Image (cartoon, coloured by chain):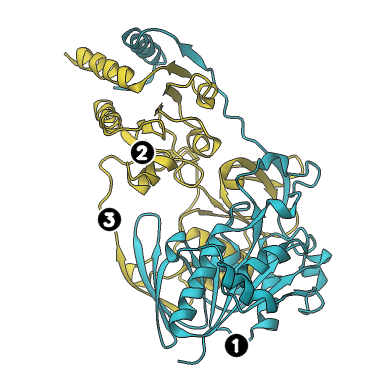
Amino acid sequence: MEQEERRLGTDLAPVIAQLVKERRPSLFLFGATSMGRDLAPAVAAYCDTGCAADLCDLARDDAGNFLQIAPAFGGRMMATVITPLMRPVIATVRPGVFEQRNSHPAGGDVETVRLNHYRARARILKETTPPPCEIGLSSAKVVVAGGAGVRDDTGWEMIKLLARRLNGAVGATRSAVDEGRVPQEAMIGSSGRSIRPDLYIAIGISGDIHHMTGVREAGLIVAVNIDASAPIFSQADYGIVGDYHTILPAWLQALQTEQC
Amino acid sequence: MRSLNMVVCVKAVPDPKRKWDTLVDPKTHTLVRKVTDQIINPLDRSALFAAVDIKRQYGGRITVLSMGPATVTANLKEALASGADRAFLLCDQHLAGSDTLATSYALGLAVKKTSPDFGLILCGASSLDGGTAQVGPQLAVQLGLTCISNVLSVEIEESLIVARTAMEHSYLKVEALMPLLLTVTSNISRPRPPTLPDIVNARGKNVQLLSAEDIGAQVEKTGVSGSPTRTVNLFIPDTRRKAVLINESPSQAVEILMENLAKSGKQLT
């Protein structure tokens, strides 16, 4: 879509719904972006069909139902939703939960469709984009994140330094974001981002399900926490029970030695 | 400007301070609702107070609308004490088990019935329990409106609304004419508990109950029959992992950790 044609999801929906009625797909997926999360349910409403939001997984059962798995209760639980009768099955898919493939194995055509003219009731006057973070959280292979347990500036300095040394990005839990330690974009969890780095290092993070659900697909999870009973330890591959004030300097030192 | 009639849609949700996994009926995968456990969805409360702020500045009338069991009356009484002028509860067996499409269908009819001359509908961007953020856009479709979502702030000039909204990586400034539907974020207002004078003033206001018949709903479009989606399972995700604990001095622990990470074969540094 051209820049000057930027529209709100609910303005665009009737035209997309028209396309759906012409082409009759069985499944129509949208990214769960701000636009997608308005557009998809609105299209579903015009087409009188079901819409599931923010899928973390999609599968099919023996009966041919699309099993749409999405977070519920703030990410504390997962719900499996089906759309047994109506078609298309419409859903928005959470960014970052599926692996992005760089090569396209088999067929499929990209078709350009001319949309009919439609009346846009809302006008976008201006868009402001704050400057992006240094290393994109969604593409980083290594992420070092801090939680409520990181209580001082030194801790956060070391986290940022460790991330730099490992060529990674910095992430955080909701409490750290609320405290203003890191920007909103760094928040990982059910109300923040889902990421799938090769290595996720959690410093002073208790392991609350809202947060951990955002890193379910991480390759390896390492946890450092002073509290041996923190739930994160059962959700990590490796855990060090200890104070980040001693662990992080040791780690940074070891990396320095390695690089020499 | 003509008097601004606003409808605020609110949902009663389980209090997040309670243990939610014990509130789910394992057979129907729906909530076991108890009145003491329910609060007004926080973002809907933000919407209500946004309406109160708008009313203070521009005048108008606030109608609060909800759908749920009779226990939600208590939550709507709180809404009346917080500044709503009228409150309606869509309370009917036929409406139970509605997904977002069936919910927006019923709410749409209720808006037409109770507030045909509305200028603005306000909803919270999403609910704590379902969290789909779909009722706003779908209700807009039911009523032939456009929906501006994730609104951080609004300005009103005659019948023109200018809203500042949050997208995932940017902010938008959007304008549209009323009638209009807005879904709001917590930035829009500062909810506060009702004061004693507020509560006393609200004494004369009652929550009015509406049935599916009252709003002229076609039964097949409501409740489970009117819901194209169905929840067939609700589970706590299993995020357990290997859980190897390294119990050494800091420098030893780091050494062991780095050895293990190197062995994992991933190019990490």
Apparent colour of chain B = cyan
Residue identified by numbered label 3: A130
Nearest the viewer among A259 and B27 is: B27
Q: Mark 1, residues whose alpha carbon is within 10 Å: few (<14), some, or many (≥20)? A: some
Q: Secondary structure at mark 3?
A: loop
- The reply to whether residue A122 is in sight is yes
Query: Do marks 2 and 3 share a subunit?
Result: yes
Q: Supply the letter of whichever chain is yellow.
A: A
The answer to whether A227 is drawn above or below residue A88 in the figure is above
Give the residue at x 63% y 68%: A45
Amino acid type, label 3: Pro
Q: Is residue A180 left or right of residue A64?
A: left
- The answer for how far apart the CA atoms under marks 1 and 3 are is 39 Å
Q: Between tags 1 and 3, which lies in front? A: 1
Give the residue at x 75% y 61%: B71
Amino acid type, label 2: Ser
Amino acid type, label 1: Asp
> Residue B47 at what x, y percent from top left?
52, 67
- The answer for how far apart the CA atoms under marks 2 and 1 are is 49 Å
> Residue B67 at what x, y percent from top left?
71, 66
Count the marks.
3
Q: Which mark is residue B117?
A: 1
Q: Between tags 2 and 1, which lies in front? A: 1
The N terminus of chain B: image quadrant: bottom left
- The reply to whether residue A22 is in sight is no
